[in-house]
């Protein structure tokens, strides 16, 4: 029973992680990084933006993914 519940939670986390990664923008700065435009307002305050929130959620979801994968490997 425990393995079934953990497997369902694992599948949900996999789907959420995939969606969050697909929602993020690319890291390419383009020509703006040559002229120093990388330190703009959005670069300095990234933690308060939607991108910063998506990065934080991605980290926690990835950690949960790895922990559940490890647990599911142990549980028989």
Image: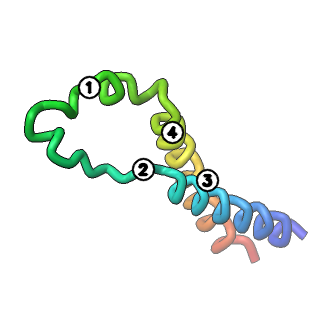
For the residues labelled 2 and 3, the Cα–Cα distance comes to 22 Å
Please determine whether, in this image, residue 40 is positioned above or below residue 33: above
What residue is disc 4 on? Answer: 56
Q: Residue furthest right?
A: 1
Which residue: 32% across, 22% down? 41
Indicate which label's residue lies in the foreground, 1 or 3: 1
Picture coordinates of residue 46 (x, y %)?
40, 29
Specify which label sits upstream in the sequence, 4 or 1.
1
Q: Quadrant of the C terminus?
A: bottom right
Specify which label sits upstream in the sequence, 1 or 3.
1
Which residue: 53% across, 42% down? 54
Residue closer to the observer: 46 or 17: 46
Specify which label sits upstream in the sequence, 2 or 3.
2
For the residues labelled 4 and 2, the Cα–Cα distance comes to 14 Å
Indicate which label's residue lies in the foreground, 4 or 1: 1
Picture coordinates of residue 7 (x, y %)?
76, 70
Q: Quadrant of the N terminus?
A: bottom right
Please determine whether, in this image, residue 40 is positioned above or below residue 73: above
Specify which label sits upstream in the sequence, 4 or 2.
2
Determine contact: label 3, label 4, CB under 8 Å.
no
Q: Secondary structure at mark 2?
A: loop
- Mark 4 closeness class: few <14, some 14–19, many ≥20 residues within 10 Å: few
Specify which label sits upstream in the sequence, 3 or 4.
4
Q: Which mark is residue 40?
A: 1
Which residue: 68% across, 70% down? 72
Q: Secondary structure at mark 1?
A: loop
- Mark 2 closeness class: few <14, some 14–19, many ≥20 residues within 10 Å: few
Q: Secondary structure at mark 4?
A: helix
What residue is disc 3 on? Answer: 64
- Mark 3 closeness class: few <14, some 14–19, many ≥20 residues within 10 Å: some
What residue is disc 2 on? Answer: 25
Picture coordinates of residue 23 (x, y %)?
53, 53
């Amino acid at each position: 029973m425990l393995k079934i519940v953990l497997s369902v939670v694992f599948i949900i986390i996999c789907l959420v992680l995939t969606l969050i990664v697909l929602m993020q923008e690319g890291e390419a700065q383009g020509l703006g990084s040559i002229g120093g435009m990388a330190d703009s307002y959005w670069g300095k305050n990234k933690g308060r933006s939607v991108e910063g929130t998506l990065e934080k959620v991605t980290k926690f979801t990835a950690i949960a993914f790895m922990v559940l994968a490890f647990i599911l490997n142990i549980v028989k």
